Image (spheres, grey):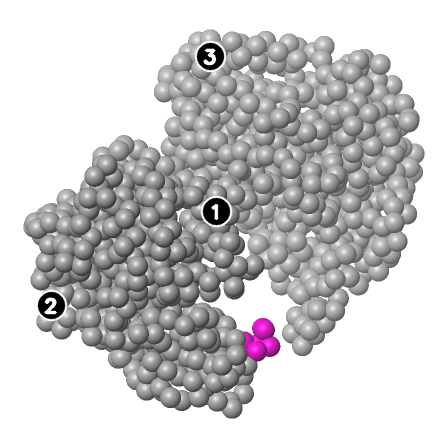
């Protein structure tokens, strides 16, 4: 039932998108050999009620991966950005 | 055929000139166009229409709309059979057939009504108490009998021949319900220029106005305002459309009964249509439902809501009874009393109040209607139709003969939709009912569903909400109210609930689920006192009518027992759907072949012309085998394998995933996503690669070729083409945005044919004039793009899945069929044969190549014997977690080959592996993943994942398939059955 405003294609039905999981978890660097950090990244998730950051891909559109901020309590979409941009900024912070 | 003896000579909105003939339980009746099945039955004097859910008690028509708890019928026949349809919602058409439910052998003589006699043994909680705990096993024995005895109608077993559709609608303002308040809201928003969608569940717009006489001011108001709405281009009114759910994001689900009122939909038209409506703002004007009053045997046919009686009288022109007792606790029933009297019925009003309003008393006297105030109906008498009631007051009891009892216990606002998003309704003592709480922004509730008492208020509030929803402030042109007969103070229903009665007869709170006041009391005594527990223990309000006529009465009973107020006792949560939605409507056109897309390769027609048997591989249709090669699949695929091993064969591999990888960092990118190394792959060379998931398990495999310095052509398995593409995009967008790489799916752009067999090279040379396919240019793992002399572009990879000398030849999809035919023709002198997925699988099993059944998302590189591929000194996806101890344990199930000890024995994929001589119990020590007959070896060979893996080589184990009753002794052998040195690819 969601409508996601894709930054490239405009607002579209969520049927065009596929869900890609939690966008708040920090992916370890490729050469990070810590099993603990990879384990946490792959398996441990919070299940928050309220605003949440998650990955969606616009598979039926421009195919961009997006970071969508969504309120899990009422499905309100608070923010949508290209994942590539969001990740670059996160690295700068 | 009987005449419509209860039909009035005039009045109502039905068309007396259009007679509809219909059958009910095999008997033929007539009705009029505009009737519902309920009104037509009543017009024929038929009150007994069903048997109750649990106790098989005779039941009649109670309501006139979606509130109806009793009159559930099975309509139509064959594949169109639809059970549990409310007779009050089913519109009549000529030729309609309806049957009653839950009775045997007939409605009038029901053998199982004996349940009614034994009902003291089937109280609330009967099933829980009897069939839980130590006696649980008994349920197995009793369930079929109980299910036969208790229940609703039966669904058809045939396929529904009708079509259902799903559609989306968008509007600025959605108005739910076309009663006076909804019409006012739609008009206000419509005049303000908004795109308005007005949805009405009944066939005729008007809501409660339809209860009014057709010569009334209310009717003029209705037709004038509807005409204005119709004249507005920006307003759409849809009748026969029920809003069943309200969801987040301004989404509303509605079901349009497009052609339910006709025998069958016209050609190409849907029977029903499911709407997903997206509205910027929503105005709920859902109206209210009258509550029954409770008394002994109040389920007797002929006991009806007073508002329903008015609807039958004024809308359908049916006089539902000639001797009427109107039992009320408020003023709203008095209009019904007067109108029934004027239509020719004898009417007595029994009012629970000591002092009804003085003006209504005077009106009753003018109509010569007897008023008994301060009295209550104690019990109804009659079996298949009410014959009399016992009335009690301070002086004693008396018996009144009657054939209709109209009950008026006050009104319950239809708060359901306004609370679907989790906003619990609140109790409004002013109107004695639950009303919507403050709604979120963009939602409005108007009309009687808010407890608004009169038409003037309903219209004014509706108008203001319509304006607000359209983003306008006040507007002077509000319509005058319709001034209905019911306008004066019809909501005031207190003291309806009371302690459960003693004495004879049963008092039903929930008619559909056969829940009595004693059941509520029992729930209270046993501690099920919260409303949610009461509901689940007694099933009160859990029927298809969602307890529209029963919830508040049940709640009042429980509040009384707990000595609390109603708001303290609480109300249950309302969830979608408001009314039942057929699965067909939810599914829409996604049935059968349309359940998911069917993908065909560019060479599909070539395969079809050869008579190929197709198999579904995901969305793809692929040739499984070509019947020209054998009488059945087993002989055909073996013949196809033999052709490849002994001469040459070709197979359509267009379904493989194909990804164009470009950019200066492409080598580094591949080096990261694949477990093996890619930096040293030369231009013009292909390499087999395996990629892992982050958790260290194998994700997919395929060959990737380097076409140029910065350009690669990746192939994936058919199954994982989509997921691999998304995964690569994910890594580039989120993990490594700094890598200068682009990936593009070209799966649909390239058709592919694999030519395999010792004479494959000759076939290629003959088919592709001008393209150098010599071993020097195209050695094993060689790749090149080329164009034939006549301009056919091809990309050739010398890679082998079968173990033979083999080439994958790709060409732009539009040339796929041409390439196929060309290779086929060129191969004729060499005895080329096409082969399907069975032979494709058989050939790779002989060579021990893992595929889908082995890459099952649970296997590691080591499990598959591919551990040596992983490069130790470079980081790649999945490398860290693949070293988790459990994934490196010695007793993991690893890939091995199996061959039968008795050469003739058959092996089965999916068989479990057990130690030799061990009993077939549990999950064994492994399982067989892939099986084929090997024409070269002359026996079955299998791949299997077995604990310990290659360490067991030489051991005898058993492959057991209990479902086939098979148990075969097999020997564990290396997974490569044929040509382990790989010499044949040079042949």
Which chain is mark 2 on? Answer: B
- The image shows residue B175 at horizontal and vertical percentages of 49, 25
Q: Name the foreground residue: B730 vs B722.
A: B722
**Mark 1 = which residue?**
B610
Q: Is residue B150 visible?
A: yes
Front of the two marks 2 and 3:
2
Element at label 3: loop
Give the left or right position of residue B779, taking residue B441 as reference.
left
Residue marked by disc 3:
B233
Report the span colored magenta. Answer: B961-966
Query: Local crowd at mark 2 within 10 Å, few (<14), some, or many (≥20)?
Result: some
Kindly indicate whether the residue at mark 1 contacts the one at mark 2 (C-beta within 8 angstroms).
no
Q: Residues within 10 Å of mark 3 (few under 14, many from 20)?
A: few
Q: Which residue is mark 2?
A: B874
Q: Nearer the viewer, mark 2 or mark 1?
A: 1
Above or below, A79 relative to B517: above
Indicate left or right for B672 with B987 as reference.
left
Label 1 environment density (alpha carbons within 10 Å; few <14, some 14–19, many ≥20): few
Q: Earlier in the sequence, mark 2 or mark 3?
A: 3
Q: Residue at x 52, y 63 (%)?
A: B635
Residue sitting at x 45%, y 30%: B168
Between the residue at mark 3 and the residue at mark 1, the CA separation in whole angstroms equals 57 Å
* Furthest-bottom residue in this view: B917
Find out whether residue B762 is within the magenta segment: no
């Amino acid at each position: 039932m969601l409508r996601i405003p894709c930054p490239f294609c405009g607002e579209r039905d969520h049927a065009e998108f596929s869900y890609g999981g939690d966008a708040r978890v920090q992916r370890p660097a490729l050469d990070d050999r810590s099993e603990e950090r990879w384990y946490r990244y792959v398996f441990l998730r919070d299940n928050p009620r309220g605003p949440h950051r998650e990955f969606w891909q616009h598979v039926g559109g421009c195919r961009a991966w997006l970071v969508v901020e969504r309120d899990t309590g009422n499905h309100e979409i608070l923010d949508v950005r290209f994942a590539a941009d969001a990740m670059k900024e996160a690295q700068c912070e | 055929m009987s005449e419509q003896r209860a039909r009035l000579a005039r009045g109502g909105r039905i068309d007396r000139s259009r007679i509809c003939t219909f059958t009910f339980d095999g008997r033929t009746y007539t009705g009029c166009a505009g009737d519902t099945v309920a009104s037509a039955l009543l017009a024929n004097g038929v009150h007994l229409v069903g048997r109750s859910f649990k106790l098989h008690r005779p039941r009649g028509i109670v309501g006139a709309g979606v509130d109806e708890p009793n009159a559930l019928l099975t309509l139509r026949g064959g594949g169109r059979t639809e059970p549990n349809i409310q007779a009050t919602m089913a519109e009549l058409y000529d030729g309609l057939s309806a049957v009653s439910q839950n009775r045997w052998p007939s409605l009038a003589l029901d053998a199982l009504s004996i349940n009614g006699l034994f009902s003291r043994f089937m109280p609330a909680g009967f099933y829980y108490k009897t069939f839980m705990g130590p006696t649980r096993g008994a349920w197995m024995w009793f369930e079929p009998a109980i299910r036969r005895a208790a229940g609703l109608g039966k669904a058809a077993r045939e396929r529904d021949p009708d079509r259902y559709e799903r559609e989306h609608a968008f509007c600025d303002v959605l108005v739910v319900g076309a009663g006076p308040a909804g019409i006012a809201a739609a008009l206000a928003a419509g005049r303000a220029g908004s795109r308005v969608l007005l949805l009405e569940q009944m066939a005729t717009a008007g809501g409660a106005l339809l209860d009014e006489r057709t010569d009334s001011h209310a009717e003029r108001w209705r037709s004038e305002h509807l005409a204005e709405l119709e004249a507005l281009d920006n307003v759409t009114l849809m009748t026969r459309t029920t809003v069943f759910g309200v969801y987040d994001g301004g989404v509303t689900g509605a079901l349009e009964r497009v052609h339910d009122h006709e025998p069958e939909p016209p050609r190409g038209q849907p029977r029903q249509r499911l709407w997903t409506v997206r509205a910027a703002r929503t105005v709920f004007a859902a109206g209210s439902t009258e509550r029954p009053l409770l008394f002994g045997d109040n389920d007797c046919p002929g006991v009806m809501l007073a508002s329903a009686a008015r609807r039958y009288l004024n809308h359908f022109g049916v006089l539902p009874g000639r001797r009427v007792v109107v039992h009320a606790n408020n003023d709203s029933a008095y209009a019904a009393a007067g109108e029934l009297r004027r239509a020719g019925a004898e009417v007595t009003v029994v009012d629970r109040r000591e002092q009804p309003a003085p003006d209504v008393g005077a009106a009753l006297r003018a109509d010569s209607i007897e008023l008994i105030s301060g009295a209550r109906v104690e019990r109804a008498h009659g079996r298949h139709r009410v014959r009399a009631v016992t009335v009690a007051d301070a002086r004693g009891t008396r018996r009144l003969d009657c054939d209709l009892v109209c009950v008026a216990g006050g009104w319950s606002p239809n708060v359901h939709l306004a609370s679907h998003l989790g906003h619990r309704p609140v109790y409004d003592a002013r109107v004695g009912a639950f009303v919507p709480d403050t709604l979120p922004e963009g939602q409005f509730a108007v009309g009687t569903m808010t407890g608004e008492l009169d038409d003037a208020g309903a219209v004014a509030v509706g108008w203001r909400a319509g304006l607000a929803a359209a983003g306008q402030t006040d507007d002077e042109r509000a319509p005058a109210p319709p001034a209905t007969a019911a306008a004066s103070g019809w909501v005031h229903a207190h003291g309806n609930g009371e302690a459960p009665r003693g004495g004879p007869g049963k008092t039903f709170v929930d008619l559909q689920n056969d829940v009595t006041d004693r059941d509520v009391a029992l729930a209270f005594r046993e501690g099920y006192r919260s409303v949610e527990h009461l509901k689940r223990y007694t099933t009160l309000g859990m029927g298809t009518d969602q307890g529209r006529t029963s919830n508040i009465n049940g709640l009042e009973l429980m509040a009384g027992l707990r000595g609390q107020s109603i708001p303290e006792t609480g109300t249950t949560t309302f969830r979608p759907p408001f009314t039942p939605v057929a699965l067909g409507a939810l599914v829409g056109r996604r049935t059968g072949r349309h359940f998911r897309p069917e993908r065909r390769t560019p060479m599909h027609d070539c395969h079809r012309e050869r008579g190929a048997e197709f198999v579904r591989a995901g969305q793809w249709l692929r040739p499984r085998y070509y019947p020209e090669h054998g009488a059945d699949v087993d002989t055909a695929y073996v013949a196809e394998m033999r052709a490849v091993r002994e001469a040459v064969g070709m197979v359509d591999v267009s379904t493989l995933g194909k990804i164009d990888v470009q950019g200066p960092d492409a080598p580094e990118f591949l080096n990261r996503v694949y477990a093996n190394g890619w930096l040293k792959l030369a231009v013009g060379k292909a390499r087999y690669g395996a990629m892992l998931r982050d958790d260290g398990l194998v994700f997919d495999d395929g060959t990737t070729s380097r076409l140029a310095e910065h350009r690669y052509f990746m192939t994936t398995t058919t199954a994982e083409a989509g997921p691999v593409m998304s995964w690569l995009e994910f890594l580039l967008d989120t993990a490594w945005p700094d890598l200068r790489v682009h990936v593009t799916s070209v799966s649909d752009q390239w058709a592919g044919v694999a030519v395999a067999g010792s004479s494959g090279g000759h076939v290629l040379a003959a088919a592709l004039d001008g393209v150098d396919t010599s071993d020097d240019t195209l050695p094993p793992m060689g790749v090149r793009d080329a164009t034939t002399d006549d301009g056919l572009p091809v990309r050739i990879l010398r890679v082998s899945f079968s173990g033979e000398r083999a080439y994958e030849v790709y060409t732009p999809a539009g040339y796929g069929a041409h390439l196929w035919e060309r290779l086929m023709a060129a191969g004729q002198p060499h005895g080329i044969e096409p082969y399907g997925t069975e032979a494709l699988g058989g050939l790779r099993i002989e060579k021990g190549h893992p595929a889908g059944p082995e890459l099952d998302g649970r296997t590691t590189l080591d499990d598959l014997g591919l551990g040596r591929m992983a490069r130790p000194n470079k980081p790649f996806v999945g490398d860290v977690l693949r070293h988790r101890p459990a994934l490196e344990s010695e007793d993991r199930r690893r890939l091995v080959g199996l061959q039968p000890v008795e050469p003739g024995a058959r092996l089965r994929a999916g068989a479990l592996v057990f130690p030799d001589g061990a009993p077939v119990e549990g999950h064994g020590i492994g399982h067989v993943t892939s099986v084929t007959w090997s024409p070269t070896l002359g026996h079955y060979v299998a791949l299997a994942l077995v604990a310990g893996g290659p360490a067991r080589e030489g051991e005898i184990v058993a492959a057991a398939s209990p479902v086939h009753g098979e148990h075969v002794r097999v020997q564990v052998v290396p997974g490569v059955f044929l040509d382990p040195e790989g010499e044949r690819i040079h042949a």
